[in-house]
Structures are given as structure tokens and as C-alpha cells.
Amino acid sequence: MSTTRSVVIGCGSYLPQRILTNEDLAKTVDTSDEWIIQRTGIRERRIAAPGEFTSHLGVNAAKAALADAQMEPSDIELIVLATSTPDNTFPATAVSIQAGLGITQGAAFDIQAVCSGFVYGLAIADSLLRSGTFKRALVIGAETFSRILDWTDRTTCVLFGDGAGAIVLEAQQQPGAREDRGVLTSHLRSDGRHKEKLYVDGGPSSTGTVGHLRMEGREVFRHAVAMITDVIEASFKATGYTANDIDWFVPHQANKRIIDGSAHKLGIDPKKVVTTVDRHGNTSAASIPLALAVARADGRIKPGDLVLIEAMGGGFTWGASLLRW
Ligand code: UT7
């Protein structure tokens, strides 16, 4: 029986121009290129220019995704922005992106699930499209983590970067069969008992300041692979697919060791793993759509491919989606 699915019809990204290398960082904090590469796989990251906000990155990524989809801004009814680094406490940065694109219809809002934000945003947009509430959505991950880093803390400042990625989703009738294109399943989790392992030490209601990112890196690392495996196994169980069926595994890009460890534990062929952490660092909610855009632009991801995405981060939050491109 035919069914409505949210199909990806476009994908794009945007990176700020300025590149900050590990060598650059070693000039300001007690670190080294060798330590950063060995522990994380990161070689460089991008840093937004003064006056360049999360909304600006998001608008540029959205424009690239719309061009890829051959759609106009007026074709979009819903904008879901995943970010933990909004331009302002309110309004939602999504409305700045909406205005930046010249869209005056439909709805735009932010969601906040830190590094898992894009998976959460995709699941929310998918539900709103499948319910018939909207026909086409932009799901965007955009971050300027450089603005919330403590640049004197070598345990965190070497890890993160700025950037944005976006996809255009369209509600389409699909046969309701194994070959269906679109989002096939999503699994979202959180466990607030871990909230102090990765957080920002400020906020409008607590300190009245923006604050800086704080992380017990080893503790996050310790939980990451098990949590990632949990939601991916749930995705396989819900769809009947297995690791062998996956064409591309596009994980959140936090640490190459976590990515490789998860792929190994799940039995996913390393050749199917899309890794961009070396060039982007950890861009939180932007990392998955940035990696999708890279793998789409270089011809790896093709229509009909089975793509698995997953993320884990502050909260803790974690989640996975399985989609056929
Ligand atoms: O996206 C959200 C999710 N976040 C993550 O997934 C991050 C998860 N955590 C990690 O990726 C890793 O835990 C880190 C990359 C943050 C750290 O790697 P690690 O292998 O867990 O190192 P560690 O924290 O155990 O630190 C090892 C040593 C320490 O020195 P001692 O105590 O052994 O003397 C640190 O002080 O490395 C030291 N260290 C550094 N040395 C040079 C910490 N940061 C640095 C640095 N440069 N930047």
C-alpha cells in the first residue's frame, strides 16, 4: 500500500573561509598537531568571521541545498534549524534564516539537541511532512561553536569548528515497499543524568551570560559507542536492514576513533564510512549535513542509496535515522 515518505531532494553546505590548523592552535595553547591527529583525527577546522553569524552560515547552506533541489525559497513551507549556537537567545535563528531566504509562509523554528540536533530535526520534519502538515522542508544544522569555546582550554578548543549543512525534504508518495525512497525510520534518545558531562556554563536563565563549553571528554567517549550502537540496532530492527545493506554510513563527526569504533562494532565496511572530521572538526549539529553534502558532491551518495546517520552528544542525547536517498 502506498505511503507518504520524506525524500531528500537536495543537499548543500557552507563553510566559513578561515581555516584554523592544528599548528595554528599549537601557537596559542599547549598542544601539538601530533596529539590532536592521534586522539581525534582532526587536522583543521573553519572559524566564522567577525560579524558572520550562525544564521548567515545557515542561509548559505540552505541556498546551496535549494539550488541542488532546483527549488525556489517559495517552495519551502517548513524550516527546522538544529543549533546550539543561536544568533540571539530569541527569536529562533530559523526565522532569521527564513527572512534571509525571503520566505514569508509556513513555519520556522530551532531545535536544540546539541550534536544530535540534525537527527532530531530530521525526525521532527519527517513527522510533519508525513502527517500532511507541510509539503517541503529545509532541515538545517548550523553552528558557530568558536563563539562558545574557552580558547585557553586545550581539552576542548582543539575539537570544534564552525559550519552549516542543509537538506531539502519533500513529502512524496512511495510504493510502501522495501525500495521506498525517503526517511525509513528514526530513533531518538536522551538521558539527562549525564547533562554535566558536556554542557555550557552559562545561559539566559542561570547566569545571564552566554558561557563556555565544558566537557569531560573521557566520560563522553566512554558512553559514545554503546549509545550509537543502541540506536543503530533499533534502526535495523525496525526496518529489517542489516549493516551489509548500508551503502553509506554518515556519522556525527566528533572523533575518528569513535567513528571507527562504532563502524567496527556494527560490522560496517570502513569503505562505506564518510569521514570529514579531519577537515571540519566537530561542528555539532552541522556535522552530518556537512558530511552528506561532501559525499553527495563527490558522487559517493547517489539516488537510491541506503544511508545511515547517527549522532551522540550533550544531554546526553543520541539518535539515528535510516533513509533511502
Ligand atoms: O560531539 C559531542 C560528543 N563529544 C565527543 O564525542 C568527544 C568525546 N571525547 C573525545 O573525543 C576524547 O575523550 C578527547 C579527544 C576529548 C580526549 O581524548 P582522550 O584520549 O580521552 O584523552 P584524555 O582526555 O584521556 O587526555 C589524555 C592526556 C591528558 O594528560 P594526562 O592527564 O594523561 O597527563 C590530557 O591533559 O592528554 C592531555 N590533553 C592534551 N594534550 C595535548 C588533553 N587535551 C590535550 C591537547 N593537547 N589538546
Image (spheres, rainbow, N blue to C red):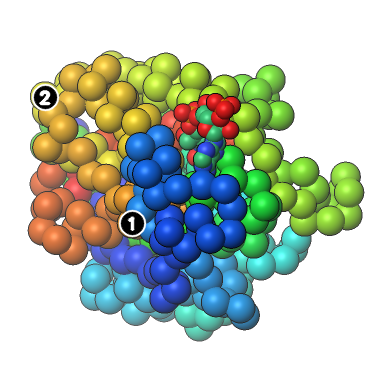
Image quadrant of residue 197?
top right
Q: Position of residue 15 (x, y in %)?
A: 40, 69
Q: Amino acid at mark 1?
A: Arg
Q: Is residue 304 left or right of residue 21?
A: left
> Mark 2 belongs to which amino acid?
Asn
Residue at 40 percent across and 49 percent down: it is 33
Residue 35 point in image, percent of width and height: 42, 40
**Secondary structure beneath disc 1?**
helix
Cα separation, mark 1 vs mark 2, equals 28 Å
Query: Few, some or many C-alpha atoms within 10 Å of disc 2 (few <14, some 14-19, many ≥20)?
Result: few
Q: Position of residue 62 (x, y in %)?
A: 40, 70
Relative placement, left or right, of 285 versus 126 is right
Query: Mark 2 highlights which residue?
Result: 244
x%, y% of residue 176? Answer: 19, 35
Mark 2 falls on what kind of element? helix
Compared to residue 106, the image places residue 172 above or below, namely above
Crowd around label 1: few <14 · some 14–19 · many ≥20 (10 Å): some
Residue ID for mark 1: 279
Q: Is residue 298 above or below residue 237?
A: below
Residue in the image at 77% along x and 56% along y: 210
Q: Is 236 on the left-hand or right-hand side of 220?
A: left
Say if residue 190 shows up in the picture: no
Tag of residue 255: none
**Residue 57 visible in this rendered orientation of the protein:** yes
The answer to whether mark 1 and mark 2 are in CB contact below 8 A is no
Image point (42%, 44%), residue name: 36
Residue 83 sits above or below residue 190 on the image? below
Quadrant of image for the N terminus? top left
**Along the line of sight, which residue is nearer the eye, 286 or 136?**
286
Q: Residue at x 50, y 67 (%)?
A: 47
- N-term mark: 1 or 2: 2
| Foreground residue among 124 and 120 | 120
